[in-house]
Every structure is written in C-alpha cells, then in structure tokens.
Image (tube, rainbow, N blue to C red):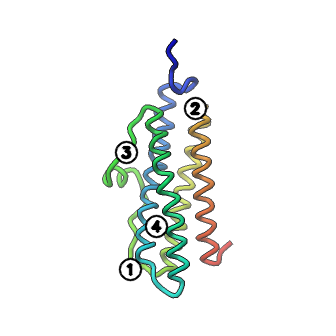
Amino acid sequence: MTIQPNTGIDTVSRGEVAAALTKALADSYALYLKTHGYHWNVRGSNFSELHALFMEQYTEMWQALDIVAERIRALGEFAPQGYAAFGNLTGIKDGDPEKDSHAMLRELLQDHETVISTLRQGIVTAEEARDVTSADLITQRLAAHEKHAWMLRATLGSK
C-alpha cells in the first residue's frame, strides 16, 4: 500500500497553498532582516528597550522561517532562496539605518500589517484547499505577527 502525501489536497490546491506560504515566507524574511538591522542601528534614550524588543521579535521570526519553508517543501514545492528571490516576492523594503527610533517603530508596524494581510489571505487559500496543516501554521504565524504589531503600537503609545 502506497501512502500519498497530503491526502485530500489535489496537486493544484497544494501549489496554491505553497504559493501563499511562499509569499508569507518572503514577507517574513524581509521583515526579519529589517528588524535585525534596526536592532543593530537603533539609538536614542530608549535604546536598551528597543534593542531588546527588536531582538525578541527578530529571533521569533528567524525560528519560524524554517518551519514555513519546510511546509512549502512538504507540499512538494521548492522554497525560495537568495536575496533576489525574496526581493521579487515581497513589497517590504529594506530599512534605513539613518531613521530615528520612532520612524523605525512606525515602519516595522506598517510592515507587520503587510505580513498580517498576506497571512490572512493565506489562511483563506489553505482553508479552501482543505489543508488544515497549512491553515494551522499560518494561523500561528498570524498570531505571532499580531502580537509583534501590538507591542510596536504600544511602544508608540497607540492602541
């Protein structure tokens, strides 16, 4: 007896889910790089607080990147690799180390909102494909990015 991977999910649907995960991976990777760069370059009276916050966030994102990429592979697709590949898949722009800490926070918040939007679309795609494993993974990533966004909003003094 041969066990087929992803039973209940047809090849077209697996490809669509993998594409949604690939977009989420690219957005997350770009945001990881920006957050890590801002961790290195933040300055000002709240340096220690922001340096630690950015480290907490980029560390969490770094650990999740591998999980998302491996899910793409489990669906039978190749995960993107290389800066050019990620750059072609995301609209998140590189950070600017010259920005002040307030501008860094605002930009990271906006980028988390971009990732959140990408993930919400991915959940719809995974649910339509009846791919509960991918939907669960994407939901976990959504919760993480919503928490990061909340922390950035709170640091900015917003609701």
- Considering every residue shown, the one lying at the far bottom of the view is 45
- Res 14 label: none
- Considering every residue shown, the one lying at the far top of the view is 1
Q: Label 3: which residue?
A: 80
Mark 3 vs mark 4, CA separation in Å: 20 Å
Q: Earlier in the sequence, mark 2 or mark 3?
A: 3
Looking at the rendered image, the disc whose residue lies closer to the viewer, 2 or 3, is 3
Mark 3 vs mark 1, CA separation in Å: 30 Å
Residue at (38, 80) in percent of width and height: 98
Q: Label 4: which residue?
A: 35
Looking at the rendered structure, the secondary structure element under dot 1 is: loop
Q: Position of residue 3 (x, y in %)?
A: 52, 19
Q: Is residue 104 above or below residue 132?
A: below
Q: Quadrant of the C terminus?
A: bottom right
Mark 4 vs mark 2, CA separation in Å: 32 Å
Looking at the rendered structure, the secondary structure element under dot 3 is: loop
Residue at (50, 82) in percent of width and height: 47
Circle 3/circle 4 CB separation < 8 Å: no
Q: Is residue 83 left or right of residue 120?
A: left
Q: Earlier in the sequence, mark 3 or mark 4?
A: 4
Q: Position of residue 12 (x, y in %)?
A: 48, 28
Answer few, some or many: residues within 10 Å of disc 4's Cα (few below 14, many 20 plus, some between 14 and 19).
Answer: many
Residue at (56, 60) in percent of width and height: 113
Q: Label 2: which residue?
A: 129
Q: Label 1: which residue?
A: 98
Looking at the rendered image, the disc whose residue lies closer to the viewer, 4 or 2, is 4
Q: Earlier in the sequence, mark 4 or mark 1?
A: 4
Q: Amino acid at mark 3?
A: Pro
Circle 4/circle 2 CB separation < 8 Å: no
